[in-house]
Amino acid sequence: MRTQLMSDQELVDQYLAGNELALERLIIRHKDKIYTSIYLMVKDSYLAEDIFQETYIKAIDYLRRGKYNEEGKFAPWVARIAYNLCIDHFRKLKRTPGIVTSEGDDIFRYMKFEETPHEEHVHLQKFETKLKDLIEQLPEEQKEVVILRHFFNFSFKEVSDYTKSPMNTCLGRMRYALINLRRLMEENQVVMR
């Protein structure tokens, strides 16, 4: 069977059986998503590339030591490794990440569904900037759940596993994050037309 047609789990099994091309296929398959997720956190292409490489070095090490048992969920597993490395980086720098795209633009700029006239576009940009600032004001645990869920596309189960918190706690943190965002929007008179 050609490696392009294999599932992630089949590729992992092939790699563990000695097929180096299987690992190459896995990396190529998930490169864009993993790199972009890292870049969203660190906002620096050189640093993102370093963390991306470190992510796969760690993943390969775990695979070789038999520490991979994610039952076919390779991409979320690697994304968690990348996220951990980003958090380690920020802990060293004692600062928190912003939310930008791989091109360095604010993530909210791409949440449009239709073209808007110039005046509405300017208003939308202002709203997006204010919303980003409000997300940054959330308590760390709430902000972490929002970032993992909406920017890393983790399921609530994956958020629960990653944070080592019960799923109901994660759901509660998301609920309180949304409540706090609404309150902050009202207090700061942030409205979207």
Image (cartoon, rainbow, N blue to C red):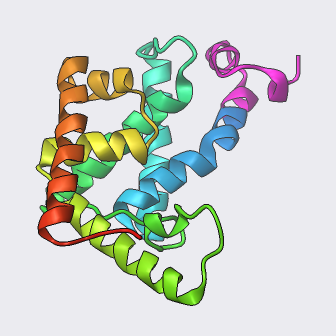
Q: Position of residue 45 (x, y in %)?
A: 48, 69
- Residue drawn 54% across the image and 25% down it: 74
- Quarter holding the N terminus is top right
- Residue drawn 88% across the image and 23% down it: 2
In the image shown, does 24 or 94 lie closer to the viewer?
94
Left or right of 145, for residue 23: right
Left or right of 23, for residue 169: left
**Prevailing secondary structure of the magenta residues:** helix
Tell me the quarter of the picture where residue 61 sits.
top left
Residue 111 in view: yes
Left or right of 130, for residue 108: right
Looking at the image, is 42 positioned above or below residue 8?
below
In the image shown, does 3 or 164 lie closer to the viewer?
164
- Quarter holding the C terminus is bottom left
- Is residue 158 located in the magenta-colored stretch of the structure? no
Q: Position of residue 10 (x, y in %)?
A: 70, 14
Range of residues picked out in magenta: 1-23
Looking at the image, is 64 positioned above or below residue 21?
above
In the image shown, does 80 or 98 lie closer to the viewer?
98
Tell me the quarter of the picture where residue 40 sits.
bottom left
Q: Position of residue 125 (x, y in %)?
A: 43, 78
Of all residues, the one furthest to the bottom in this rendering is 119
Of all residues, the one furthest to the front in this rendering is 193
Looking at the image, is 127 positioned above or below residue 65?
below
- Residue drawn 36% across the image and 73% down it: 127
- Is residue 9 located in the magenta-colored stretch of the structure? yes
Q: Position of residue 28 (x, y in %)?
A: 69, 43
- Residue drawn 17% across the image and 24% down it: 169
Numbered marks: total: 0
Residue 93 in view: no
Looking at the image, is 129 positioned above or below residue 148?
below
